[in-house]
Amino acid sequence: MLIDHLNQQLRERAAAGLRRQRRTATSACAPQQQVQAGADAPSRALLGFCSNDYLGLANHPALIDALAEGARLYGAGSGASHLVSGHSRAHAVLEDLLAQWMEPAIPQARVLTFSTGYMANLALLTALGDERTTLFCDKRNHASLIDGARLARAAVQRYPHADLAALERQLQTCNTPLRLIVTDTVFSMDGDQADLPALLALAERHDAWLILDDAHGFGVLGPHGQGSLAQAGLRSERLILMGTLGKAAGIGGAFVAAHPVIIDWLVQTARSYVFTTAASPALAHALQTSLQLIAGDEGHQRRALLRQRIAQLRSGLQTLIDAHPHLAWTLAPSDTAIQPLIVGDNARALALSAALDAHDLWITAIRPPTVPPGTARLRIALSAAHSASDVQRLLAALHTIALQWT
């Protein structure tokens, strides 16, 4: 009965253009990868535009060497949770370094590291969202924030995406003693950025705290890659920031930066921290080198290259869209590495992804429930490791497909 039920559900998902498929990369993370479409399929060389390796550090020789050095110093695994015996010197040093990075924005900042951003967001919202609290959540928040809010004991109010007037009306009528505004800084499927100064002003006016998911800003934004808070020039103890270390930082894991009392509370009560094995200390060791690269001259140069690729792609895509209005493609307003080409229909998004695959280009079609119905898209993700010729190759393929679909 269960298998029959699930098979029917899978058929319905496939008919609606919603069934997901995995591919297997057989080479290191880079714009050019060897990829298998299935276990028995031969690998093919594909030029990818769907990785979150925004600075191109995932295969950086210095990080490979640092990871090997970390394994020699600390072994492969941590062996236990942070609160049992899994918290190594490598974790402690990484947390101190990240706290120094965040202190200009968050006074007295302390940091707690996690295995994934998903676990960090679950920790934040379930540990802070008790019965005396209301969570005010942007409707386009990442799934980890949505799930954290669902699991919290707090009341939850969702406001229309980036609609701060609606958010203020909700804050004005809130009668719980604690209020937490929860938002992505860079929205993962749209690439747009939250208005952080206005959100902090609302938090101060209504005695609220501001929880920020900076997964797609950390390492990329700000003068030295410290992220969205540095870019906005904000400083307040009301700020609570989650950043991931597997995107621009090139390795893996996540962290929460906040007032020391908040961090202590997470250590005591956050179930997705307390009851899970600590990440490998070798990763924490390698991340120290990653932070050095991000903050140094090389990081500055890579962020400049990324901005060039963003401008090149946006200019080329807008020219293409203007030349083929019958396709009804739209380019979302984004100044970040996330550049969504919105197609609309699920089947059309899948067809466009497949057509690009025929040109040996890899961009996954993003469909509901990840994005709202009717906004299926190609989420084009750029990296500093992409060359100008890589971007031009993508634009040329899209132009060829647009002519074929005319």
Image (cartoon, helix red, strand yellow):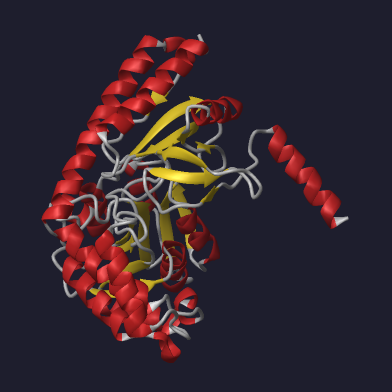
- Does the image show residue 239? no
- Does the image show residue 250? yes
Q: Is residue 353 above or below residue 323?
A: below
Q: In which quarter of the image is the N terminus?
A: bottom right
**As drawn, which residue projects farthest toward the front?**
42
Place residue 294 in its image quadrant: bottom left
**What percent of the width, then of the height, locates residue 114?**
40, 71
Residue for point 80% across, 44% down: 8
Judge by depth and name the residue closer to the eye, 135 or 336.
Answer: 336
Q: In this view, does 154 lie to the left or right of 87?
A: right
Q: In this view, does 232 lie to the left or right of 287?
A: left
Place residue 21 in its image quadrant: top right
* Number of numbered tags placed on the structure image: 0
**What percent of the width, then of the height, locates residue 18?**
63, 38
Q: In this view, does 135 lie above or below 87?
A: above
Judge by depth and name the residue closer to the eye, 125 or 205.
Answer: 125
Q: In this view, does 286 lie to the left or right of 154?
A: left
Q: Is residue 382 above or below residue 333?
A: below
**What percent of the width, then of the height, locates residue 205?**
23, 56
Place residue 330 in its image quadrant: top left
**What percent of the width, then of the height, locates residue 320?**
36, 16
Residue for point 41% across, 84% down: 82
**As drawn, which residue projects farthest toward the bottom?**
85
Residue for point 63% across, 43% down: 41
**As drawn, which residue projects farthest toward the right?**
1
